[in-house]
Image (cartoon, rainbow, N blue to C red):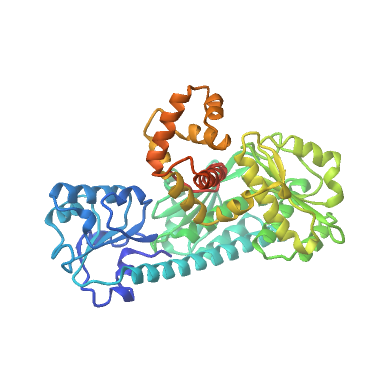
Amino acid sequence: MILTVASVLELEPFEGSGARVVTGEDHLSREVRWVHASELADIAQYLSGGELLLTAGTGLGWTEESQRRYIREIAAAGAAALVVEESGRIFDAVPKAAIDEASKVDLPLVALSREIPFAQVSAKVHEVLTQIRVHILTREREIEASFSELLIQGADHLGIARELAKVTGCSVVLENIVHQVMAYVGKSAAANHIVDNWAVHSRETHHDDDESCIRRTVTMRGQQWGWIHLLSDGGAPFGEIDRFAVERAAGTVAASLLTDRTKEARDDQRSTALITRLMLGDLTGAAFAERARQIGYRLSGDNVVVLVINNDGRAPGEGRPTLPYISAHLGDYTLVVIPEQALNSTEVRSALAEASAGGGISRPVKVDDISVALTQAQSAATVARSLANYPVLRFDELGVERILVALGQGPELANFVRDELGPILTWDASTANPLMPTLRAFLDCDGRKSDAAAKLFIQRRTLYNRLDRLSTLLRRSLDEPATRQRLLLAVKGLDLLESDPRSRFRH
């Protein structure tokens, strides 16, 4: 479920605008991820892909060269489409040079014969995007819960394949490492034909954007076991929900296969499923504690503490600490729920001492408040991963990082970092003499230039030159305490974003 250029042009704000597609009519199915209105000539540097760009035309410039360059740059930046007013404010008609260049780069170019409030377009598109995102998140939550419930019930890989087919409406094939079909749920004659000739399909090259099949690897005990395929059956293109479901199904199959082998693996997966449901909000703290008791973990009646141990890339069992408490290996980290009195046990202290990538510890809470403790421990672990020595931090040790971590869950922190440090990050990306180390040292020394020069092992004159360059790029004086405070927060935010494996932050 996506918002396309074509569907945006059908929204209410465009009614009566005289909108006409000048170029790129064959590309109106492009996804629109954002709307941006700008008259800047160099707006391309601020685009990250998927934007519907609205303009009165000022940024195009008055020469053919500037107009062609503008079109090339926004197309290269991944803009979904360009909408230009022809109302006479800047242009009576879109310049021919812009049209020619847009045709060359396959950029949808839309002309408006009458002015429309760009703010209304942005508001409406953002409203639709929010509705789509809420729908996707809700659906993902339902899918996550359904696969977790299958694990708790002990479903085998065939049951998991059936569930994937149910939630996506597509045919599903599960094959092992030697391309033997282990499970098949067909939805069409076309899928039956593919399976009848499976040796041909199974050796085809698959890509993430494949229109006919999504394939994901099933890994068990660090070894490739096989693959799970989602076949389109010639229907609608795959969407974000389909890809999410395949990812979860692959992981669930792997877990199911493991549970067929040892009780230890079965118990571990039940723990993971319970913790996953707790994180999704499908279980209250009390219900979680009761289910944990049923599989041998006593939590009710005591204060509990949540530990998050950052994983360092090793697979489960490769030197990771094993604790006799309910836990889950969740890719980037291992989450453990323990009774408060166990915090000083030998096993827990050893595990925390061996946490080579750091971790976080929540405050002690009642079982009803485990969800709060989850957030606290994850926040502390995120901050720990951003620090050079990878410590294990208690939530109460965090300062302003508590706010930054919370902001990092949405676009606010990334936008703040780009606004404050964008010019420096752009400079550093294109030069062999980066300025971020100088800025970090200067901020660490609270603006004391002699101390910063000593920390960097450079002469003060060299430091002054670098600071002058920084001031020029930032267009503000680094001597102002308020400026240094903002930059210090931005640097901390940058470290948090770059250290979080889940972050999509790009300079």
Between 63 and 78, the one lying in front of the other is: 63
Give x and y (percent) for residue 135. 51, 68
Residue 433 visible: yes
Count of numbered marks: 0
- Side of 475 relative to 486 (left or right): left
Residue sitting at x 47%, y 40% = 478
Rendering quarter of residue 222: top right
The location of residue 153, given as percent across then percent down, is 71, 61
Residue 267 sits above or below residue 33 on the image: above
Q: Can you say which quadrant of the picture contains the C terminus?
A: top left
Q: Is residue 474 left or right of residue 18?
A: right
Residue closest to the eye, 215 or 126: 126
Residue beneath the point at 85% across and 47% down:
342
Residue under the point 49% across and 22% down:
458
Q: Position of residue 107 (x, y in %)?
A: 25, 55
Q: In x, y percent, where is residue 127? A: 43, 70
Residue 202 shows in this picture = no
Q: Quadrant of the N terminus?
A: bottom left
Vertical comparison of 221 with 272: above or below: above
Q: Nearer the viewer, residue 206 or 389?
A: 389
Which residue is nearer to you in this view: 278 or 173? 278
**Residue 267 located left or right of residue 182:** right
